[in-house]
Amino acid sequence: MRWPRWATLGLFLLVLTMAAGSGSLLLTHPAGEHTARNFIVLGAVSMAIAVLGLLINRKVPDNLVGLLLTWVGTIAMFLAARDVYYAIVAAAGVPGAVPPTSGVVADGAVLPFDSRVVALLDESGWWLFVAVALLLLHFPDGLLSGRRWRTVAVSLVVLGFAQQGFGAVATIPFPAPLQDLPRPFGRPPLAIRALSEVVFALMLALFIAAAISLFVRFRRSTGRVRAQLKWLSLAGLAVVTYPFVCLTEIVLTGDTASVSTVFGIATLIALPASVAVAMLRHDLYDVDRVVADTVTYAIVMVVLLGTYAVTALTLGLFLGKGSATAAAIATAACALVLAPLRARLQRLVDRRLYPPRRAALLAIEDLQRRIHTDQAQPEELEKSLQTALRDPTLRVGLLVPGASGFIDAKGSPVGISGGVPVMLGGVQIGLLEGETGPAVLRAVATSAASLVEVSRLRAELAGALREVEASRTRLVQAGDQERRRLERDLHDGAQQRLVSLGMAMRLAQRHLDDGTVDVNGLLDQGVAELATAIAELRQIAHGLRPTSLDDGLHAALAAITQTLPIPVQLHIGPGELPDDLATTAYFVAAEAVANAAKYSRATSIAVRVAQSAGDVRIRVEDDGCGGAIPRPGSGLSGLVDRVAAVGGSLSMNSPAGRGTTIEAVLPCGS
């Protein structure tokens, strides 16, 4: 359900009111440096928890997790403010008074105070545990895992009230600094005390059940929910480690002091921080890596603290308690244990808690080893990762120059819309995509970059070889077609005319003396046929090499552009080109200009031919509609083969509505 905004705002204003009230009390009624320091630290942490809860509630208003986290911060702030109030009351000397009292005079001001209220609020700290337990039950989607867990949630609230009521009639002294304040309600009956113990045991059982609900939810979850639960587990690790830290400090110093306090505050911060990251940015980091590292360092810390404590205590028996030599030796022992312990624990924990990443990295290492022994190929990377990560949807896309998108190792297009980029030297060379989490894919992308680069280069080389083979095939086919065309044109045109001319000459020879044939007319007809045959031969030869190129490239291009209805600007650099380059340049420009005039609806065309020390560049631009696409068998496809035959390259840029540019680069040394 959506929590009302006024209620959320009310919780926040309550936190601010308690913080402001407690701060003003500390300013007007000083209660000691220790109390002020504790309130500043706990108040800041409580405020941060409440604000994080409000932020989560704003981002996901239909989720109770943000509200419950704000409740945790509110209760923590209340407990901090209560302790400040009690410290000021204790400083006024009230603990020795006979309860109840209606007010306390502190520095001339009357502060309300009643020991009955103190008794009723004595067990308010239980509500902090109830709020955390409810948070665990509803995390991360704001819903309970099932109907049976509703009983646990309701029982937590009911028993929370019961526990607070039993706390009011407890027989043990109030906590410091009101330990001397008498209990206002006297000693309760035995039945009440027995029932209180039962409620206490039930509360502990419900807290354990709330923690178990996370394990139940984790086993049923996948994807986002599982990642969020893993983030929350970090707070659980901090809670588990905290007692060991306290115990070690007690062994070494005899009491819990600054180390336990700092670690306790860190533990308190761990819960809201984990919840906030899980709810707002669950994919911020590789949560499996964070959990594995946290477990590793937690174990290392516990072992080192134990090593230090045992070494220091043992040496202290001989060198004396507090000996600097014993502390130095204990520190050295910890340093010697640290390096090998951390490495071995990291491997052990990774096997248990970080299997996806570890499995993928091991698969990459195994593939690299098999490649070095000629037992595998780099193109098997995708299959190896699919098997290791158990993700059949995982794809490895290669970014090959000249390709319109990502391709696989076989050169087929890969339809990848998102995924994790594979970078090498700051340049993207590929992409990984699948159902596997992005954090694991990022780790895999880093380790597999060299294999992706090798696969990409091999795919680029294979594509180039395929294109060379296809170009060679097209050239052979074009040559065969051209020979058949020449044969047909010669047979149907000039050859027939020359045969006819030969027959006419033979006829004239036979009837030259008898006068039966008009020899002059026959000769005139033969001369006409010969002229026609010569014209047809010139036309055929023009398709092989235009005779206009004898006067230079500029003259040849001017001859074909001056008859077009579209103005064509020619910019031909000075200097003569080798005949093969001039012929290729002529056909590139002629085909591009013809296409622009026929299809582009252009209003102007520009042809530029520039020669440098190493190459010749032919560039044809128009201002037409653009959107041209080279198709197999088209004139542009033939130009690609013609340019490639002299070692050059041809490119086309034709965005829709922005004209077309065709550029060929021909090496001068070809």
Image: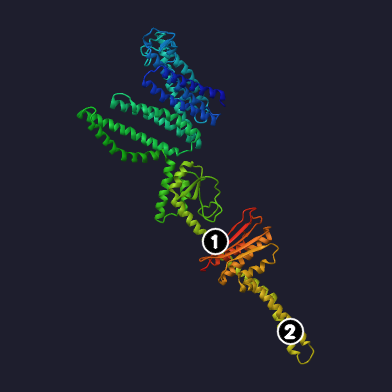
Q: Which mark is residue 530?
A: none
The residue at the point 54 percent across, 67 percent down is 646
Disc 2 is placed on an element classified as helix
Give the mark nearest the N terminus, 1 or 2: 1
- The location of residue 527, given as percent across then percent down, is 72, 82
Distance from the alpha carbon under mark 1 to that under mark 2: 53 Å
Badge 1 density bin: few <14, some 14–19, many ≥20, Cα 10 Å: few
How many discs mark residues in the rendered view? 2
Q: Which residue is at the far right?
A: 516
Residue found at the far top of this picture: 98
Residue type highlighted by circle 2? Ala
According to the picture, the residue beneath numbered tag 1 turns out to be: 467
Outermost residue to the left? 318
Q: Quadrant of residue 443?
A: top left
The answer to whether 373 is drawn above or below residue 542 in the figure is above
Q: Identify the image quadrant of the N terminus.
A: top right
Relative depth, front residue between 200 and 609: 609
Query: What percent of the width, then of the height, locates residue 529?
Result: 72, 80
Work out whether residue 635 or residue 585 is closer to the camera in this orientation and state it.
585
Residue 215, can we see it? no
Residue toward you, 384 or 300 = 300
Q: Coloured how? A: rainbow
